[in-house]
Amino acid sequence: MALYTHHLPGWKREEVEAIKQLNGEYALVGLVDVYGIPAAQLQQIRRNLRGTAVIRMARNTLMQHSFDELGGDWASVRKYIDGNTALIYSNENPFRLFKLLAKNKTKMAAKPGQAAPEDIIVTKGPTSFKPGPIVGELQQAGIPAAIQGGKVQIKETKTVVRKGEVINAKQADVLAKLGIKPMDVGLVIQIVYYQGSIFEPEVLDIDEAAILAQVGLAAAQAFNLSVNAAIPTPETVGVILARAESEARSLGIEVPVYAKELVGAIIGRAYREMAAVGAAVGEY
């Protein structure tokens, strides 16, 4: 449903016009989720992306106004605006931008109530803690600990929280004290609008190594098919001719065909056969 934009206050109208202008200046317009990103980390991400992408924070309603006023394909973008959304602008390829944002993620300490993105493991060994209440805190969080050599020692490697499980307050506290930062923090792409098409994260998240391997396999299979079916291409014509020459030569020797190029090979074959017969006769 379109939003009515009449009678917007001045500052809101200016924001809507600024977004519309940026939408026309960049080849790529994306929506990113900024939920849970502290201000310091967001500023660092901005610095890391300088020269490649621009992040603009705005109210969801004003972003929706902007896309509605642009109309056409832009209007289909508004339905993806949800939650803590920000705009990202770039002239970069959407796949490269997705990869760049993934690289710019940083690690942070877990907060109570967050789900573990992966198994959180505390390894066996000494810590920097002196004897004290920390021993009990570790044990309450499910980490076996004891005093050894005047320091707190973790007695065995332990999976404290499994992937997908919720991290409780005690676990979050001791993990932070141990310097373990399991949470990835960074911009998460919701969608990218590029050259008239909308790209969702599932499309952009590709395994480059796997794709290159598939392309290499397809190229090798196409090459073999071209050679075996004798379909000449600039890449395979040399191999096809060499194979044909080799097969013609083998056929000429087998028949035999006494061409000057084959006489030596035919005589050599006859000599080997004669020698084999002589050796076999000599054994009896």
Image: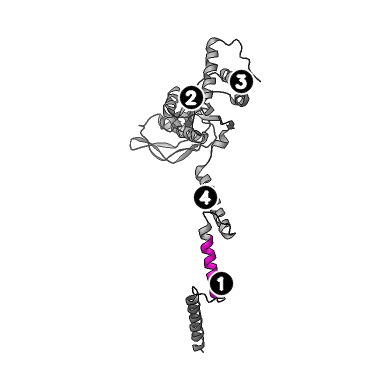
Residue 260 - label: none
Residue 9, by quadrant, is top right
Circle 2 residue? 55
SS at badge 4: helix
Question: Does residue 136 show up magenta in the picture?
Answer: no
Circle 4 residue? 216
Q: Earlier in the sequence, mark 1 or mark 3?
A: 3
Circle 3 residue? 68
Stretch of the chain drawn in magenta? 240-253
Q: CA–CA distance between discs 3 and 2?
A: 20 Å
As drawn, 56 above or below 221: above
For badge 1, the amino acid type reads: Leu
Residue 192 location (% of width, % of height): 55, 30
Q: CA–CA distance between discs 2 and 1?
A: 71 Å
As drawn, 158 above or below 188: below
Q: CA–CA distance between discs 4 and 1?
A: 34 Å
